[in-house]
Amino acid sequence: MVAFIARRLAAAFFVVLASSFIVYVMMAYAGDPLAFLIEITDDNQRRAVEQAVTENLNLDTPVVARYFLWLGDIFQGDFGISARTQLPVWDELSFRIPMTLKLVGTALLLSILVGVAVGVVTAIRQYSGFDYLVTFFTFVFFALPVFWVAVILKNAGGINFNDWLRDSAQFSPTFLVVAGILTAIVVYSSAGGSPARKASVAAIGVAAVEGILIYVSVTRWMRNPGFGPVVVGLLAIGIAVAVTAVMAGWRNTKARNSALTTAGIGIVLWFPLQTWLDDTSIWKILGLGVVAVLVGVAVGYAWGGYDKGLSANCAAVVALLVSVVIFVDRAMQSWDDYSANPVIRNRPIKTIGDREARLDGDFWLTTNDFFSHLVLPTTALMLISVATYTRYSRSSMLEVLNQDYIRTARSKGLTERTVVVRHALRNALIPLATVVALDIGVVLGGAVITETVFEWNAMGRMFIDGLNNLDPNPVMAFFVVIAVTAVLFNLVADLMYVVLDPRIRISGAARS
Amino acid sequence: VSTRRRSRTLLSLLAVASVGALTTVGAASATTPPGTEPVGTEAASTEPAGTAAAGGGGVGEVGGSACGIPHGPYEDPGAPAGEVRVGWNDPLLSFNNSTIHAGAVANINPLALMNSGFSYYDADLQLINNDQFGTCTLDSLDPLTITYRINEGVTWSDGVQVDAADMLLVWGSLSTIFNDENTVVTPDGITAEADENGSPIVVGPDGAEITSVDEEAYASAFDPESGALLEGFAYKESAGVSFDGIDEFFELVTQTPVISDDGLAMTLTADSFYVDYPTVAPKSDDMQPAHIVAGRALGIDDPAAAKQALIDAFVNDDAAALKPIADFWNRGFDTDELPDDPGVYVSNGPYNLTGYTQRAEMTFEAREDYTWGPKPQVQTIVYRIIGDPTAAVQAMENEEIDMIQPQATSDLLTQLEALADRGIEVQTGDGATYEHVDLVVNNGGPFDPATYGGDDATALAVRQAFLKTVPRQEIIDRLIVPLNPEAAIRNSYTQVPGSPGYDEIAQNNGLAAYDAVDIAGAQALLEGAGVTAPIQVRFHYAANNPRRASEYELIRDSAAQAGFEVLDGASPNWGVELPNTDIYDAALFGWQSVDIDVAAGHQPNYVTGGDNNFYGYSSEVVDGLYDELTASTDAAQQQELLLQIEQQLVADAFGVPIFQFPEVLAYNTTYVSGADSIPLAPTMFYAFWEWQAAG
């Protein structure tokens, strides 16, 4: 294992080295980073700047030698200075990295969740109406330019949504009808069984969706959202049931009881948490999350049984998800405060920037601010990735479903759910590890545009500015961060194989 | 094993996907910013301030104001309230806008909010003296002597009185006389002290200085083959006081100014007359806090002591003290976020800076103890930086900002006008920049007499013929009227349309002859001169500017009818290439006005060897008239001289001005009223004290 990681790290090191060399040389031949000197009219000043920049960037050294000088600095953690501003690149990079991380991380996580879920469903319902619908839209998303999507999103999801929220916060009858028809199509085509069963499932689905929409509309829920104890309770129980079904199977009574107990604890805790959470911080929230997971584990062991570990895992996952529900519920309760803040002007969804610097409020206000700035750029960035994950997880799932061991499982008389969830899904996820690793690069590339359109002063912006100014150090700093990230994720992907696929044993010596 | 193989195929598929993503990046960056459209960079400005000033009772006369019309006390509009959010495309990069490297419009706007100054331009482009801040007295015209006095009680936001030390810093930093002339940069890039021959002084192994006066000793310090210094020898490094600032007027003040006993006034005497003296009094973006500069540079905490140290340094020309002062003045104010040192952003005007999120947003709060000038009515001004014009319009629609002044394009205007039902009003008008075509007369091209064996008359006829074909009205109708319905041909080389002197000069200078395209006339001129078609004209303009490309096409098609073949010389580096007339015969670009002055703005464009006269144009008449103009103290005479200059330029077919850039101002009436703009920096910030936060 150690030998493997060492070998991969060594290979990765040379990959980064070679590619950084290529980028550095290309950057050097792209143009003169000192071209802007022409704008400085004072001779003394121009000479001083020219000298300082030339010295710092070693512009008087041939390109290849200059690359190695740069490399030497990088190994000492020195990213050099920008030719244009003559300020250390690291100063800029250090505050931009978290911003990019926030954007890219959220987009990546959500696109994996959504993409895999949709992909798996389309694989199970291959050639259904739902499958065709999804296929159609994935190709549309593939084809859309990010900057255009961003403009459209700002208009629909930002400006029009804010207008709607302020003017009525109620759905029009047309909207309800269209939503009903769409739900009917999606649910009918993704449900299984006879046409009659599909129709009845679709009818239930439509009724549920319309019910929710009408409730939201009548109570103007979007202006003052929140779940309340009843919905939190229903969600918690739903989570417990779903997690048990997926992880352990519904018939595993110990796991089921653990999950339901944990959910029950969560529901009870909702009441005191309403006041406990009023004054909080990110650390308190994270701490509570850890406590919740530990409680889940404890509950799992308390129920005992021969498979205590599995019960504990189930309960831990339930605890975590219920915590998230409670967190979201509490954040939603501050939504109207946030919206009514004079800085926000009752228009909560923002089209520029990553936060309102002037917003002065508690943790929940800033949390709402965080998400209201994040939602549009994340969505723009997600669309293409979601399409990728949908396609790959669909084809991967289809391939697995055609394997012999799936036929064996089915012929054993296992339920379809067990076959799909326990036998097929896990194996279908293995190749996705590689896709995720590679997608990191794509998402970071997309972030360059997204950050520009949404006016985020993050890493991608620095890269674009550096490129326009022919300024090598910021460009190289961006490149190094991206390259190292991509390479590391590839390594992580390889290690994930071990976790996901028991047939693979990574070690120095091959086994068969 | 099979799992692994599959992952390889995925890898190659994905590689294709990521290449696709990269292509998009390139495409986006190549097509992006209409906002960064380069306008002419150098400053050219126009109108004689004297005309306006002379009427203002003693302004421009000895004993009167030397920096515009004194305003007198301002009305108190009451306590400021509410918030207004403005958008701008570039971030402030320095709180010192006087340095050459950092001087930019993006700094001027925030500084206009933060600081007061001796004068500013009003809606009629008149120079107004804010006499509640300070006065400028014209003590004498010969020699030109002016006393700048700052009123008692005018303070920096840290409570320190603004006084003559701050004025002395303005003079010292811009006069260039403190800059070390004896500094040369050696071939290996070292800043060294120069000897009397301008060669770098060398220090020998024994520590003795070797100069090039002693040729033999000097030569022995170098390797005869490589020319490099021998081991043991070194260049004598220079302390190199170098202020990165320059001003034509302060350069003329080589005598140390006199500071009054109370320390609030500074009197300076220029070595020769400077006709544009009214415009040189520091405006809101022209002063830096002396106590901060000297305090930080020399490590003095006490403001009074720091100011005294600064005065001493300048008065005694103390290079050891001036070096750190210059260094701090040059770079100490450069920042793109709220500096850790609050001294860097102290201000002396209506607003205090309270926040600057890096390159994203600045917040200004009205200063409570501010009494010396127009009082603002808005408590908080939020200044958001939005580079992409589409993003700015959408942010405006989403009410994230209340006011923008984007680069005018017809798409943008359409988008903004569609927002009328949201209470967004759009104002269009003239901007500060004017478009023009100039002809090259020194490159052996079609407009150069040398091409016709030195025959001036033939070259003149060809130039006139070409100018007759420039479809000025059509260019305006097609490209500018959609953005500014009031747009008209600009018919002056020196005057801004709408300024007091414009009409008379435009009617009489002869440019009106080129209002309409005259193909027959052009052909007749060419025939008379005996020049045969086709005449090739290499046409130089900005490559990334669609409007100039359209102008080029219109000119090309029109000129073709008279027998000119206008060749496309679109260049991405057009600005840098302007001095190289070997590559073009005619240039199309814009000059931007930064001040309303008599001569300083346009003199470099038209005099022989002027900095902005790239084309080899040389006229003894024009040079002589400018000499008279720069010595003239009488407004009527100045106006007459300007007319004569323009008539000569027309007679020589120098080129033609075409139109004033259109400018668009959009503001949301739900949140702000009183918004307006002038065609000079700080454009929409020129009278921010008229803004009111509505709603």
Image (cartoon, coloured by chain):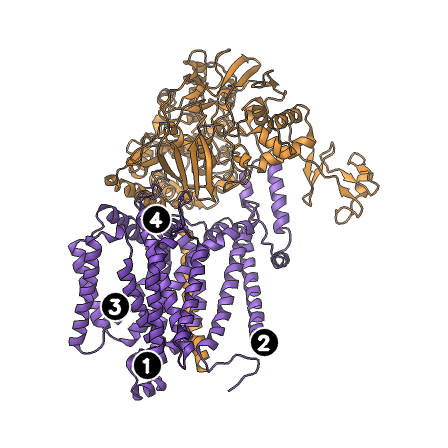
Chain colours: A purple, B orange
Q: Which residue is mark 3?
A: A133
Instruction: Say which amino acid is labelled 2.
Output: Ala
Q: Which residue is mark 2?
A: A3
The answer to whether the residues at label 4 and label 1 have Cβ atoms under 8 Å apart is: no
Q: Earlier in the sequence, mark 1 or mark 2?
A: 2
Give residue B317's quadrant in the image. top right
Instruction: Say which amino acid is labelled 3.
Output: Leu
Q: Are marks 4 and 1 on the same chain?
A: yes
Q: At 47% across and 71% down in the image, what residue appears?
A: A493
Q: Which residue is mark 1?
A: A419
Residues packed near mark 3 inside 10 Å, few (<14), some (14 to 19) or many (20 plus): some
Please state which of the two labelled residues, at mark 4 or mark 3, is closer to the viewer.
4
Spatial distance from mark 2 to mark 3, Cα to Cα? 47 Å
Q: Earlier in the sequence, mark 4 or mark 1?
A: 4
Residues packed near mark 2 inside 10 Å, few (<14), some (14 to 19) or many (20 plus): few
Q: Secondary structure at mark 3?
A: helix
Name the subunit of mark 2: A
Q: Quadrant of the C terminus of chain B?
A: top left
Along the line of sight, the residue nearer the viewer: B261 or B123 = B261
Q: Could you say which disc has been placed on residue A350 in the image?
A: 4
Name the subunit of mark 3: A
Q: Are marks 2 and 3 on the same chain?
A: yes
Residue B144 point in image, percent of width and height: 56, 16
